[in-house]
Amino acid sequence: MSLRENLRELDDRIGRAAEKAGRSPDEVTTIAVTKTVGPELVREAFEAGIRHFGENRVQEAGSKIRQLTALESTPTWHMIGHLQTNKVPTAIGLFDLIHGVDSVRLADAISLNAQHRMPVLLQVNVSGEPSKSGFPPAEVAAALERIATLPHLEVRGLMTIAPLTNDPEDVRPVFRQLRMLRDSLGLKHLSMGMTDDFEVAIEEGATMIRIGRAIFGERSR
């Protein structure tokens, strides 16, 4: 299937999932994950209507974004991977929103280096997997209270990465717990759901989904 066909199918699936949950598909922002995707394919996705793009690595993003500065309007770039504190100054100059603030130390570094209020999401390790970064759910409220005092940071919501599973229903409790936590904190956004589980994430309240394979196909490397 072509990229445009992939996007049409994706839009249909998003619409069905939103309808099932009594939501509007307009409440869900699709972030096209461009890890290992070349600039020309990113340009094609932009021309097909995608306006939000997500990168996992600062260095790869810098090269790609510089090659796409001539686009007719400016895409919104999301940092969706783990951000090291030494990469913060570069990341702030590249990205419009940072998803994975997983420690107070990283939040401090972003606020210290930013020249304006940088929008961020707090990453929550809902599943408790040792391999994943993020605040434990029980520590998010205290972390938010501390981070909310930083002058150049704006916390807009929460983000999580669900465990890999063959059945998306297995991760519904993860998404539901994040939504309940978001609601208790009075935040707006939920970045959750990827190619294998985004429909369940939408049903549970996702406002941002991070989609790679369903748009661009399998990664080449």
Image (cartoon, rainbow, N blue to C red):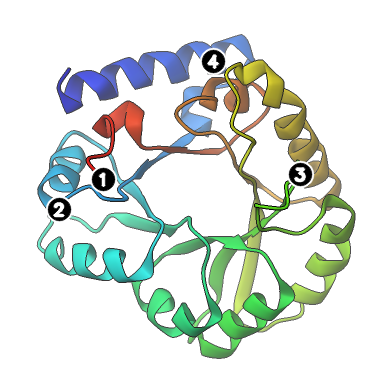
Label placed on residue 125: none
Of mark 2 and mark 3, the one earlier in the sequence is: 2
Vertically, is 56 above or below 105? above
Is 214 on the left or on the right of 139, as rendered? Answer: left
Contact between marks 1 and 3 (CB within 8 A): the answer is no
Name the residue type under label 2: Pro
Of mark 1 and mark 3, the one earlier in the sequence is: 3
Q: Which residue is mark 2?
A: 39
Query: Looking at the image, is mark 4 or mark 2 nearer the viewer?
Result: 2
Contact between marks 4 and 3 (CB within 8 A): the answer is no
- What is the spatial separation of the Cα atoms under label 2 and label 3, in whole angstroms? 34 Å
Of mark 4 and mark 2, the one earlier in the sequence is: 4
Q: Considering the numbered disc 4 on the image, is that residue within a helix, a strand or a loop?
A: helix
- What is the spatial separation of the Cα atoms under label 1 and label 3, in whole angstroms? 29 Å
Q: Which residue is mark 1?
A: 221
Of mark 4 and mark 1, the one earlier in the sequence is: 4
Question: Measuring 64% from the left and 15% from the top, which residue is drawn there?
Answer: 21
Contact between marks 2 and 1 (CB within 8 A): the answer is no
Q: In the image, residue 48 lies at what x, y percent?
A: 18, 33
Q: Which residue is mark 3?
A: 126
Q: Considering the numbered disc 2 on the image, is that residue within a helix, a strand or a loop?
A: helix
